[in-house]
């Protein structure tokens, strides 16, 4: 699951994800090169993220978080599913600061759970970064159309199409149309299972990177990687 988008944050006064990553990296005395190698993210892209010139997808952020010895919830405040049942009419939505992707969290956490699952609303013109990571993914197009790239092969996926692949194969995708796309993403990449908590010093600034949104209107952004 990958993506990069640049939009104006809806809330002011909250630290952006890039600043939080940079602060944690420096706290760990890591160079950009060391973090990029551990997270399997290019140094150039990581530098853009830290300077808030690019916004990572949840999957990429999870790789960065793991390399920094923390869980993804160190950087974001996503709604937590309290039960295994979610209702379409009242499911919580959220988005990452700087990204136009809107996520609906479907899965919950319990001992031994390995799956993460989201419904994603993808605006026209969105283009993701190329990533490769552990685990596997299933992508199912609910509405609209996307262009998926996998190991250099490009394929157009329309409503009803699905793709199952290993995450270590380089992949990216984009919405090449003038209409929003709605996707179901499921994978074994751990996103909200923490490995560590922020220290008191960083916790003062390490607050929401994800913002709850209700019925967020998807606009037609001019987005670049």
Image (tube, grey):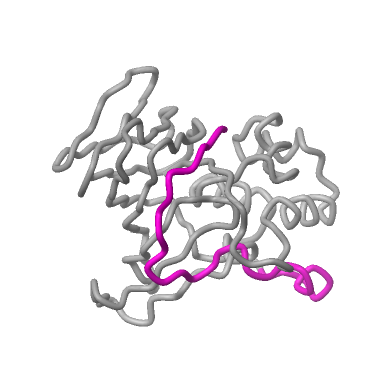
Q: Quadrant of the N terminus?
A: top left
Q: Farthest residue toward the left?
A: 160
Classify residue 175 by image quadrant: top left
Q: Is residue 16 above or below residue 44?
A: below
**Camera-nearest residue between 34 and 43:** 43
Q: Farthest residue toward the top?
A: 152
The image shows residue 64 at horizontal and vertical percentages of: 62, 47
Q: Is residue 218 above or below residue 86?
A: above
Q: Quadrant of the C terminus?
A: top right
Label the magenta part by its dominant secondary structure.
loop
The image shows residue 97 at horizontal and vertical percentages of: 59, 57
Say whether residue 187 is left or right of residue 212: left
The image shows residue 190 at horizontal and vertical percentages of: 46, 56
Classify residue 148 by image quadrant: top left
Q: Is residue 197 above or below residue 219?
A: below
Q: Tell me what residue is drawn at x 76 percent, y 33 percent.
A: 33
Residue 129 belongs to the span the image colors magenta: no
Say whether residue 164 is left or right of residue 56: left
Say whether residue 101 is left or right of residue 53: left
Q: Farthest residue toward the bottom?
A: 82
Residue 217 belongs to the span the image colors magenta: yes
Q: Tell me what residue is drawn at x 42 percent, y 64 percent.
A: 216
Classify residue 6 by image quadrant: top right
The magenta segment? 197-225
């Amino acid at each position: 699951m990958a993506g990069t988008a640049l939009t104006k944050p809806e809330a002011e006064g909250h630290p952006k994800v890039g600043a939080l990553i940079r602060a944690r990296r420096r706290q760990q005395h890591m160079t950009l090169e060391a973090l990029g190698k551990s997270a399997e993210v290019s140094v150039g892209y990581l530098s853009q993220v830290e300077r808030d010139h690019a916004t990572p997808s949840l999957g990429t952020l999870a790789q960065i978080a793991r390399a920094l010895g923390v869980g993804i919830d160190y950087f974001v405040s996503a709604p937590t599913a309290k039960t295994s049942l979610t209702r379409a009419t009242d499911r919580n939505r959220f988005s990452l600061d700087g990204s136009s992707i809107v996520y609906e969290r479907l899965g919950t956490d319990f001992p031994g759970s390995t799956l993460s699952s989201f419904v994603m609303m993808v605006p026209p013109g969105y283009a993701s970064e190329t990533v490769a990571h552990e685990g596997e993914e299933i992508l199912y197009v609910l509405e609209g159309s996307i262009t998926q790239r996998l190991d250099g092969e490009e394929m157009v996926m329309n409503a009803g199409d699905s793709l199952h692949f290993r995450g270590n194969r380089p992949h990216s995708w984009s919405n090449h149309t003038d209409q929003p796309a709605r996707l179901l993403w499921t994978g074994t990449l751990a996103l909200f299972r923490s490995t560590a908590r922020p220290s008191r010093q960083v916790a003062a600034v390490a607050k929401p990177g994800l913002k709850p949104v209700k019925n967020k209107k998807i606009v037609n952004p001019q987005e670049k990687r």
